[in-house]
Image (cartoon, grey):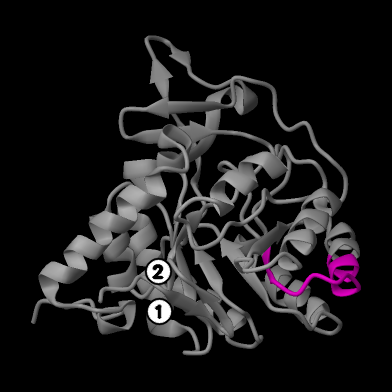
Amino acid sequence: MVSTATKIGTFDFDNCLMNAAGVYCMTREELADIDASAAGSFVTKTGTLNARAGNPEPRYVDTSLGSINSMGLPNHGFQYYLDFVTELQNTPNSKNHFLSLVGMSEEETHTILKAVQDSDYQGLVELNLSCPNVPGKPQIAYDFETTEKLLKDIFAYFTKPLGVKLPPYFDIAHFDRAAAVFNQFPLAFVNCINSIGNGLVIEDETVVIKPKHGFGGIGGDYIKPTALANVHAFYQRLNPTIPIIGTGGVKTGRDAFEHILCGASMVQLGTVLHQEGPAVFERITNELKAIMTEKGYESLDDFRGKLQYLD
């Protein structure tokens, strides 16, 4: 029997597929739709200390090879999502979930995480170090010293399972430096990757989104090679106790298969989920299972991380 079940630490999931933060996760209703789908889990919209309206529209546009967005972290505030996942964990046969969070400053991040630490929530937490679309705010994870200090301060008080959402890295030396930082901490997972920041899409003579004069995060087909490289680079470098969630360019079972082959334990859907809705999880799961059956694989462990090289 072919199974796409997986684990992140001590947390079990019936399916390795889930949504990517930022897609189909703004409201309780959207999250409930993901929960009721074939997805193994959901991650909430990245919640900030206070609710945010985000950037002006149009701020998301589908393109021929994916999407461009500059959302600006619109969300209902972390407490909205914390309340929801806490309620869900107390329902019968509840799936395990991910709560995505970030502060607009270091102080806000600590305020949020201390509130989660003191709450009844027992699920996974994702600290988003990679939002590329807030004007005037750099991506934290590109500053290795700041990232190391932030994680050191967090793990001084935070004892619940915490992972990080990462931007794409593009240099081997940066993979080395980032992994050296992350390996110092008991991370529950790393998630590779967020969208490639500050792309530009033009139609006729005009940019297609309003914020930042058209600059926005690129997702979809464009970014799969970069996502696969980041997944595999960190699979090679991180402590074996830190699982990897693969995100970027997944729209078929073959794409999900490649993420797992590169080392991913779970795979997130972004652009394709926005385009097709929650029914996409069943389609891609079936396509992944068909590939596994054809190759004689019964579980993800049979091929996870077993990417082959040319001699």
Are the residues flagged by discs 1 and 2 in contact, CB closer than 8 Å?
A: yes
Q: Quadrant of the C terminus?
A: bottom left
Please state which amino acid type lies under the numbered disc 1. Answer: Tyr
User: Please, what is the three-letter code of the amino acid marked with disc 2?
Assistant: Val
Percent coordinates x, y for residue 146 in the rendering: 73, 69
Give percent across and percent down for residue 193.
Answer: 48, 58
Q: Secondary structure at mark 2?
A: helix
**Local crowd size for mark 1, using a 10 Å CA cut-off: few (<14), some (14–19), many (≥20):** many
Name the residue that disc number 1 marks: 235
Q: Which residue is mark 2?
A: 231
User: In which quarter of the view is residue 260 placed?
Assistant: bottom left
| Quarter occupied by residue 119 | bottom right
Identify which residue, 158 or 3, lies in the foreground.
3
| Residue appearing at x 79%, y 60% in the figure | 87
SS assignment at label 1: helix
Q: Residue furthest top?
A: 204
Instruction: Look at 86% across and 61% down and name the residue there.
Output: 112
Q: Is residue 104 visible?
A: no
Q: Is residue 224 above or below residue 259?
A: above
Question: At which x and y percent is residue 263?
Answer: 36, 75
Question: Is 121 in front, or is 246?
Answer: 121
Which portion, as a residue range, is magenta? 113-126
Please state if 167 lies on the left or on the right of 6 as rendered: right
How many other residues sit within 10 Å of disc 2, few (<14), some (14-19) or many (≥20)? many
* Pick the front one: 47 or 308: 47
Which residue reaches farthest front? 92
